[in-house]
Amino acid sequence: MSFLGPFGELTTAQRHTFFASLAGWSLDAFDFFIFVLCLSAISDDFHVQIHDVAVGISLTLAMRPLGALFFGWLAEKYGRRPILMLNVVSYSVFELASAFAPNLVTLLVLRALFGFAMGGEWGVGAALALETLPAKGRGFFSGLLQEGYVIGFLAASIVSRFAFEYVGWRGMFIIGAMPALLVFYIRRNVPESPAWLAGQQSKRASIGELWTVVRAHLPLLFYMILLMACFNAFSHGSQDLYKPFLLKQRGYTPQISDTLIIVMNVGALLGGIFFGAFSEKLGRKRAIALAALLALPMIPLWAFSATPVMLALGGFLMQFMVQGAWGIVPAHINELAPTAVRAILPGFAYQFGNFIMSLLSPIQASYAESNGGDFATMLAWTIGIVAVVLATVTLLGPEAKNVDMGAKQT
């Protein structure tokens, strides 16, 4: 084993592919969380309530399944690599357009379009990476790949901490257009998925042919959608309204709030990598359930602490568990999916789970605002319930740890 760990055993092409997929998901999340971190500022600028602006989160999540279907079908037909580039350009364009929205209605429309573009990236990027990488160490790579979501959140938090007071929320969206530059790297360095190249039927797949394969795996699809709905409630339910909680209920400054979110995301990044690698030994299902249940004892520290230091510790530990469970997702659901629909089935399940939970943030905000701004109680109940449900659903489902993900898999 090289001192570089699992990376030391990858070829140059595999490293480029993994980095591109990781960067695509990280920058996608970066653009998404810029909006989340600007909820309060946008509500003040447009003179509306936070839950009115939070509808933009719902619209983004609701449109992501459509994007997953559309871009997933394109990736099965034309290849993972060119469609990943198309995804990156698309969500960058809508992010830039959001900076110039003259009113809330226009901004909400643009966030819906952003969601459509964002919806395709995860499935296409994960398929490209995991079909290219070896089975050995897949749990580690899965953990790191999924934590692109956290890397994006962390990057958005850092930019918000140091740039927001100078550029405002509109300037934040302009900065969010920078991911488009990733396309040049992908075009120069990333080869096509060997599994897609070897699967000749994928090159000429029609919608009807894809539906035939999907229909043969409907029970699996329904299970994956349920699983991903639980996962999305776990992450969005613990993250999207945490900054309004710090600003409105705790009364912290934007700088202190962003610092706490940075600490929280460091915990999330480490948790995803740890549990992703740990799933190689413990198994995918048991590692997910363990991380979910370990979130329960973190709730008091995370939601009810009275000082910034203790909230930082609680946020670190909570997101270590939340994203620890999430870190196993790319490997787990891509291992369950057949090769012929790997770019479309996991991605659609992921994003349809997002759709099912798309109203969670406005519901949470409305509950908190109608109860005297009590975000803490709302957050605690959300995670308390979701953690138990997620662990149960995971343990009742199938597992295909280290399955061959080559073109011959059926």
Image (cartoon, rainbow, N blue to C red):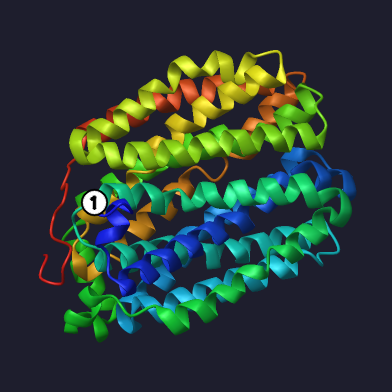
Residue situated furthest front in the rendering: 3
Tell me where residue 367 sits by quadrant: top right
> Is residue 124 in view?
yes
Residue at 41%, 40% (x, y): give it: 272
Say above or below: 325 vs 352: above
Residue at 81%, 50% (x, y): give it: 164
> Percent x, y for residue 282?
20, 33
Find numbered disc 1 in the image and state the secondary structure of the residue it sits on. Answer: loop
Q: Name the residue under label 1.
A: 137
Front-most of residues 2 and 142? 2
> Percent x, y for residue 129?
33, 65
Question: Could you tell whether 301 is left or right of 231 in the image?
Answer: right
Front-most of residues 327 and 313? 313
Front-most of residues 208 and 289? 289
Residue at 50%, 27% (x, y): give it: 318
> Percent x, y for residue 182?
55, 73
Q: How crowded is mark 1: few (under 14 residues within 10 Å), some or many (20 or more)?
A: some
Residue at 83%, 32% (x, y): give it: 253
Q: Which amino acid does label 1 sit on?
A: Gly
